[in-house]
Image (cartoon, grey):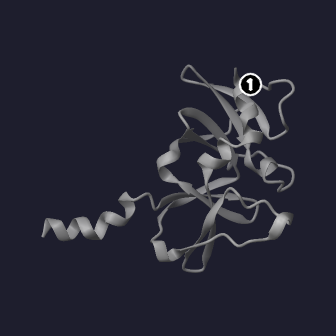
Amino acid sequence: MAQNNMENTGTSAVGNEFLTFTLGHEEYGIDILKVQEIRGYDAVTEIANTPEFIKGVINLRGIIVPIVDMRIKFNLGHAEYNELTVVIILNVANRVVGMVVDGVSDVITLNADQIKAAPEFGSAIDTQYVKGIGTVDERMLILVDIEKLMTSQDMDLMDRAAA
């Protein structure tokens, strides 16, 4: 009987759990295993000569953490900071990074048949950080490869900004 239970719950063990969050009117998902914690948005210490999407750094229990505003990074317009704005603290590529989002929804489990490949838009839209599109009932989630995004060439500036 215990063997049967393992088979039924095995889907979440292969990394199909996603933390969902909103940016503007769209809902996104990232691998829950990359999430360290979720915090309210606090003031950041700005660093000179950093890209606009790097809001600055915070001191998180003795660790200097760069904070990236995902709305600015994804060119989704001006970011409004209010009581719903949150920072998702991530652990990617052995470093801690915070990303500002409009709000966090929930944690969902997606089976392989609920994840579709990212559509090709040609060179007009950069989809290299999109893992796929997840579907749950009527919801569509843009699944972001957060490790690939946070370790990409344009984000490499974070190491210099936080150093």
Which residue is pictured at 54% across the width and 80% down the height?
A: 137
Q: Does 30 sit above or below residue 95? A: below
Q: Please name the amino acid that badge 1 sits on.
A: Arg
Image quarter in which the N terminus is found: bottom left
Residue 35 % position (x, y): 52, 45
- Which residue is found at the position 44% from the left and 57% from the top? 15
Residue 159 position in % (x across, y down)? 69, 28
Residue placed at 78% from the left, 35% from the top?
55
Kind of element beneath mark 1: helix
Residue that numbered label 1 is attached to: 160
Q: On the rendered structure, is 145 left or right of 51?
A: left
Residue 143 locus on image (x, y percent): 61, 62
- Residue 69 relative to residue 131: left or right: right
The residue lying furthest to the left in this view is 1
Q: Residue at x 71, y 58 (%)?
A: 128
Q: Residue furthest bottom?
A: 138
* Closest to the observer, 116 or 47: 116
Q: Nearer the viewer, residue 7 or 71?
A: 7
Q: Quadrant of the C terminus?
A: top right
Residue 140 in view, yes or no: yes
Observer able to see residue 43? no
Q: Residues within 10 Å of mark 1 (few under 14, many from 20)?
A: few
Left/right of residue 108 with respect to residue 63 in the rendered view: left
In the picture, measured across the screen, residue 137 lies left or right of residue 124, that is left
Nearer to us in this view, 48 or 87 = 48
The quadrant holding residue 23 is bottom right
Give residue 160's position: percent from left, percent from top. 74, 25
Q: Quadrant of residue 57?
A: top right
Whether 134 is drawn above or below 46: the answer is below
